[in-house]
């Protein structure tokens, strides 16, 4: 599709010796929210890892074309600088790396890449504080070590904070709703909705439809056994809720 | 003086070679333990013999008038200045530990018949700066430190070397931490060029309900070994932390014995080692819990990150336990940087090289941040980053 921002073409990938993605095709349209749903083991997380260049995943065939260029050989940091962002299902804890310092380093790397002037510490802190407040996060998040000792909800909010500050163009949300209570889910969803500007694309990977009540998807894709087996509008969610994934296979 | 000449000497010959009289017990202990060599358990991974084979000039240790200054400044083993009102003087050491495992503890005492005695009275912060100005020298001195009951003192120790080379420093403390008192010792060593090697042999005696925190940040080059023996009385507590950052061919580390003698005594020892080049790090640490030390809690851990495949970590955490009523744990890990953490940083646009640096600094920071005073914490962070960035 010529209008897509990301075109995943016949993607095949394995982890170790096990083939997980078996010819996956998907086009992400600018400004649209694409939700990927599927049973356990279908390859949802492998897809998200493949898109950001995770070391676990080896691409064995097909291509990922982003803004007209193949990115499958690009380093993870290059993909990030080009505007691809993954909100991790399980964000890693990094004791000793200050949250604000980390995020400022990341933001300034991106600004430098874009030929913009880097932000100094004071400018950055102002920006960070504004976003913290919006996400209902405590101000001590600035000085704490990256994700260390954070609750599940705090980690997910921190992922969204990074997304808001880095302003990526393709946002992959891997199980963003897992482990969130209703308040955290609402705050996280507000953060995501704030990023919708008609240009950015979202790839929302989820088991459950709950998050889709807050982030209205444009497309639902069903991923099963390493392939997209069905694409439809939001009405597909109700069908999945009622009949499960097996029914889709039969359809 | 060539220390290797003392090798294998029996008591009488040793006393004659060292020209000491009336300190037979110490000479006997030194003869019994023998001059360190590759065969000595405590020095197995340290190249002591190459240091002892060199000829060193010996210095005279005539005490000078102590000038008034903000810090205690010790130049080549002699006190040059000290804060006004501080009780600091030279005296024969009265309380020498006759059960120390380190022969260099006894050699140090034999070479330093008069020790620098510091009596800390009150809740104070003291800075001690050691200066070394002589090349090809054997600089040997010892410090005895007393603090008083119910007092809380902090000691910051730094080392400054002038343009010297090929010097061996033998120094160390006998610390007596009085009942219900607290002593924090923070030691920072950043010497990078091959200016001097050091063996620091320490003994720390922690009385009932006293607390001692010993933190060393060793960013030095060449060879250096800290020998540490800590005796804990009833409800006494020690928290020891050691950060090691080594590169090139340096061999440095710690050999320690923490001995729980009193009931309810507690210890926590943590080592973080970052090794680059062909460096060798040493963490050879024993915790012994004696029959008298029921309800002890002891915790010991060493973590090492190897930044080069030629770097090598000797990690020997050991527990020696004679009772059942205690809680004790120990462990050691040696590995590379965590690839999940590296990937996370890269996935946010931070380059691989920068991400590695951030993780190394973060690893060091977890120990540096245990220094509560923010000014000193910042100073150590800066020192670490300066040394690390010089090499990366």
Image: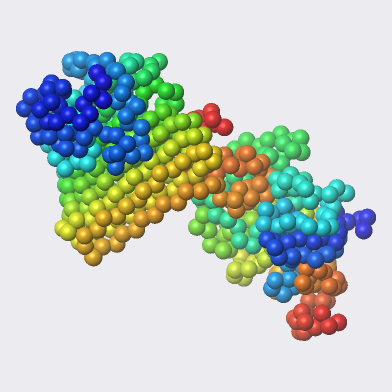
Whether B114 is drawn above or below A83: the answer is above
Q: Residue at x 84, y 57 (%)?
A: A62
Outermost residue on the right side: it is A2
Residue A103, percent from left and from top: 62, 45
Residue B22, percent from left and from top: 6, 27
Quarter of the N terminus of chain B within the rendering: top left
Residue B246, percent from left and from top: 46, 35
Q: Residue at x 49, y 44 (%)?
A: B305
Q: Is residue B78 left or right of residue B311?
A: left
Q: Residue at x 29, y 18 (%)?
A: B55
Whether A153 is drawn above or below A95: the answer is below
Residue B371, percent from left and from top: 38, 41
Quarter of the C terminus of chain B within the rendering: top right
**Residue B217 visible (yes or no):** yes
Q: Quadrant of residue A202?
A: bottom right
Q: Is residue A99 left or right of residue B274?
A: right
Whether B161 is drawn above or below B226: the answer is above
Q: Residue at x 26, y 48 (%)?
A: B258
Give the colour scheme of this rendering: rainbow
Instruction: Give the number of marks.
Output: 0
Q: Quadrant of residue A2?
A: bottom right
Outermost residue on the left side: it is B22
Choose between B181 and B39: the one closer to the eye: B39
Whether B51 is drawn above or below B218: the answer is above
Choose between B112 and B125: the one closer to the eye: B112
Q: Is residue B252 left or right of residue B276?
A: left
Choose between A189 and B383: the one closer to the eye: B383
**Residue B226 visible (yes or no):** no
């Amino acid at each position: 599709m010529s209008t897509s921002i990301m075109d995943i073409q016949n993607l095949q990938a394995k982890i170790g010796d096990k083939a997980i993605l078996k010819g996956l095709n998907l086009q992400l349209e600018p400004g649209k929210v694409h939700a990927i749903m599927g049973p356990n083991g279908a390859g949802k997380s492998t897809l998200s890892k493949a898109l950001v260049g995770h070391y676990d995943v080896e691409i064995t065939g097909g291509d990922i074309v982003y803004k007209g260029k193949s990115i499958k050989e690009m380093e993870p940091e290059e993909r990030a600088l080009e505007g691809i962002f993954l909100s991790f299902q399980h964000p890693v804890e990094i004791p000793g790396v200050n949250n604000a310092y980390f995020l400022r380093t990341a933001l300034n790397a991106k600004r430098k890449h874009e030929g913009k002037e880097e932000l100094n510490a004071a400018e950055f802190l102002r920006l960070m504080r504004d976003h913290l407040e919006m996400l209902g996060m405590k101000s001590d998040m600035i000085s704490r070590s990256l994700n260390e000792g954070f609750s599940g909800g705090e980690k997910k909010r921190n992922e969204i904070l990074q997304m808001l500050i880095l302003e990526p163009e393709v946002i992959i949300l891997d199980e963003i709703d897992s482990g969130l209570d209703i308040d955290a889910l609402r705050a996280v969803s507000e953060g995501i909705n704030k990023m919708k500007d008609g240009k950015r694309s979202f790839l929302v990977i989820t088991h459950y439809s709950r998050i889709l009540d807050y982030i209205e998807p444009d497309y639902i894709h069903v991923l099963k056994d390493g392939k997209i087996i069905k694409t439809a509008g939001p009405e597909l969610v109700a069908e999945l809720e009622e009949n499960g994934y097996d029914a889709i296979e039969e359809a | 003086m060539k220390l290797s000449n003392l090798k294998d000497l029996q008591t009488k010959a040793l006393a004659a070679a060292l020209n000491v009289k009336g300190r037979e017990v110490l000479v006997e202990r030194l003869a019994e333990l023998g001059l360190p060599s590759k065969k000595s358990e405590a020095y197995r991974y340290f190249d002591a013999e190459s240091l002892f084979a060199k000829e060193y000039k010996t210095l005279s240790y005539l005490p000078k008038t102590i000038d008034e200054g903000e810090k205690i400044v010790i130049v080549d083993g002699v006190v040059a200045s000290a804060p006004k009102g501080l009780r600091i003087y030279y005296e024969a050491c009265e309380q020498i530990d006759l059960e120390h495992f380190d022969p260099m503890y006894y050699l140090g005492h034999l070479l330093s018949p008069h020790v620098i005695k510091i009596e800390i009275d009150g809740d104070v912060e003291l800075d001690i700066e050691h200066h070394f100005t002589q090349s090809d020298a054997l600089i040997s001195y010892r410090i005895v430190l007393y603090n008083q009951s119910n007092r809380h003192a902090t000691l910051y120790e730094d080392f400054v070397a002038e343009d010297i080379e090929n010097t061996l420093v033998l120094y160390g403390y006998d610390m007596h931490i009085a009942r219900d008192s607290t002593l924090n010792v923070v030691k920072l060593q950043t010497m990078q060029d091959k200016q001097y090697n050091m063996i620091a042999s320490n003994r720390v005696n922690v009385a009932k309900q006293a607390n001692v925190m010993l933190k060393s940040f060793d960013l030095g080059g060449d060879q250096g070994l800290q020998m540490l023996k800590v005796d804990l009385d009833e409800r006494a507590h020690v928290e020891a932390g050691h950060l090691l950052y080594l590169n090139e061919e340096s061999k440095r580390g710690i050999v320690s014995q923490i001995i729980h003698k009193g009931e309810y005594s507690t210890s926590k020892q943590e080592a973080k080692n970052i090794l680059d080049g062909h460096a060798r790090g040493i963490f050879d640490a024993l915790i012994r819990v004696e029959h008298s030390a029921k309800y002890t809690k002891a915790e010991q851990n060493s973590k090492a990150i190897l930044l080069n495949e030629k770097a090598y970590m000797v990690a020997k955490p050991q527990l020696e336990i004679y009772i059942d009523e205690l809680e004790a744990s120990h462990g050691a890990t040696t590995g590379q940087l965590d690839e999940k953490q590296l990937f996370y940083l890269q996935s946010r646009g931070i380059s691989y090289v920068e991400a590695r640096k951030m993780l190394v600094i973060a690893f060091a920071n977890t120990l540096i941040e245990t220094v509560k005073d923010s000014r000193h914490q910042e100073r150590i962070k800066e020192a670490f980053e300066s040394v690390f960035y010089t090499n990366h």
